[in-house]
Image (cartoon, rainbow, N blue to C red):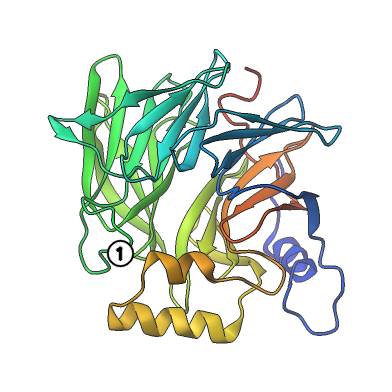
Amino acid sequence: MQKTSREEWLAFAETLRVNAPNRSDQGLQTVATGLQRPECVLTHSSGRLFVSDRRGGVTTLWPDGRQQLSGHSSLLPNGIALQRDGSFLIANLGPNGGVWQIAPDGQASAWMTEVDGQVIDRVNFVTNDAEGRVWACISATDGGDKYPLRHASGSIVLCDAAGTRIVADGLHYTNECRVSADSRFMYVNETFGRRLSRFRIADNGELIDRETMATFGDGDFPDGLALDAEGGAWVVCVGSNRVYRIAPDGEKQTIIDDAVTVTAAELEVAFDAGTLDRTQLSAARGHRLSNVTSLAFGGPDLRTAYMGCLAGDSLMSFRSPVAGLAPVHWNW
C-alpha cells in the first residue's frame, strides 16, 4: 500500500483550514442536526451512525435521515460501544458512574460498577477490541466538575476472560483509548497530561512500557482518538477545536484548526492557574465546530471522518485521504 506523502498531507490540511481568511467552504459538511450532546460517534458498514444522547441512551442515524433513540434513563452517556447482540455499553459520566448496558429494547442495566473491590466513579470511555476484550477509561478517582489538573489518578480497566481489573494507573486524566491493528499496543489520550501515550499490551492484558507519542499545548486538551490504515493516530482536542494526526514516526500534523484565539488563550490561562473546570472546557466553541470531542471513520471506503461534539446539536464530517481502521463492530 502506497503511503500518503507529507506534501499530500499538507495539501489536504490546507483544504480544512477552517479559520483561514476569506474561505467559505473548507470541506466540512453537516451530517445531522437536532442531536443532544453527541459526544461520541460510531460508524457501521450499513451506513448507520450511532451517537451518545444526553437523554440517557444512544441515537441511531439512518442513511435516509431518520433518527431513533434507544434508551431513556438518568445516565449521561459519554463513550459508547456497540455489542454483537445490538446492545450498547455506556460509559456513564453521570454522578452514579460505572459502565452500563442499554439493551436493544432500550432497557438500561448496570454492567460494571466496581473494580478491584472499589466502586467506580464517572467513566469517560469504553471500547471493544478484536480479541473480544472490553476496555474502560476512568479519568480520575475524583470525577467532579472541578478537574484534578495536577493529579494523575486516572486508570484503564480491562474486562476479559480472566475477569475485570485495572491494568494501568497513574494516568493524567484518561480519555479515549484505542488498540492497534495488530493488537500489540494501546494508545490513550491523557487530557491534562496533554499527551498521547502508548503502552505495549502484555500477554496477560497488563499495559506496560509506556511511551509518549505526542504532546500538546496552546489550549489543546487531547480527547477523541482514532487510528488509520497507515498507522497514524488522529487526536481531537476538546476546547481548541483542533484535530491532529500523529504519524508513525511521531510527526504531528495539523488537520483542522478551528480554534478561536481568545478562547484558546483563556483555556490556557485557566489551566495554568489551576481553575479550569468542566463548565468552561465543555462550553468552548470554535468558528464552525461546536467543541469537537471524537472522530470515527466510516463510509463505504472508511474515508469519511465524522466528528462528535459537546456544545452543539450536530455532527460534522470531512473526507480523509487515508482510510481509517474499521471498528471491530463494523459488520456486526
The residue located at (38%, 60%) in the rendering is 191
The quadrant the N terminus occupies is: top right
Give left or right: position of 219 versus 191. right
- List x then y, in percent, for residue 224: 51, 52
Given residues 134 and 141, the one toward you in this image is: 141
Label 1 CA crowd tier, 10 Å (few <14, some 14–19, many 20+): some
Compared with residue 332, is residue 76 higher up or lower down, i.e. above or below? Answer: below
The C terminus: image quadrant: top right
Across and down, in percent, residue 261 comes to 58, 85
Q: Quadrant of residue 137?
A: top left
- The vertical placement of 198 against 267, above or below, is above
**Up-down relation of residue 191 to residue 22 (above or below):** above
Horizontally, residue 289 falls left or right of residue 328, namely right
Query: Which percent across, then down, holds residue 228?
Result: 61, 44
Tell which of 309 and 194 is nearer to you: 309
Q: How many marks?
A: 1
In front here: 260 or 199? 260
Q: Position of residue 40 (x, y in %)?
A: 56, 44
- Left or right? Give the position of 176 relative to 43: left
Res. 278 image quadrant: bottom left
- Closest to the observer: 48 or 167? 48
Q: Residue furthest left?
A: 117
Mark 1 — residue? 147
Q: Is residue 212 left or right of residue 75?
A: left
Secondary structure under the numbered disc 1 in the rendered image: loop
Identify the residue at horizontal 40%, vertical 28% (top origin): 100
Quadrant housing residue 125:
top left
Who's the residue at 45% across and 33% down the image? 90
Residue positioned 21% across, 46% down in the render: 169
Q: Amino acid at mark 1?
A: Tyr
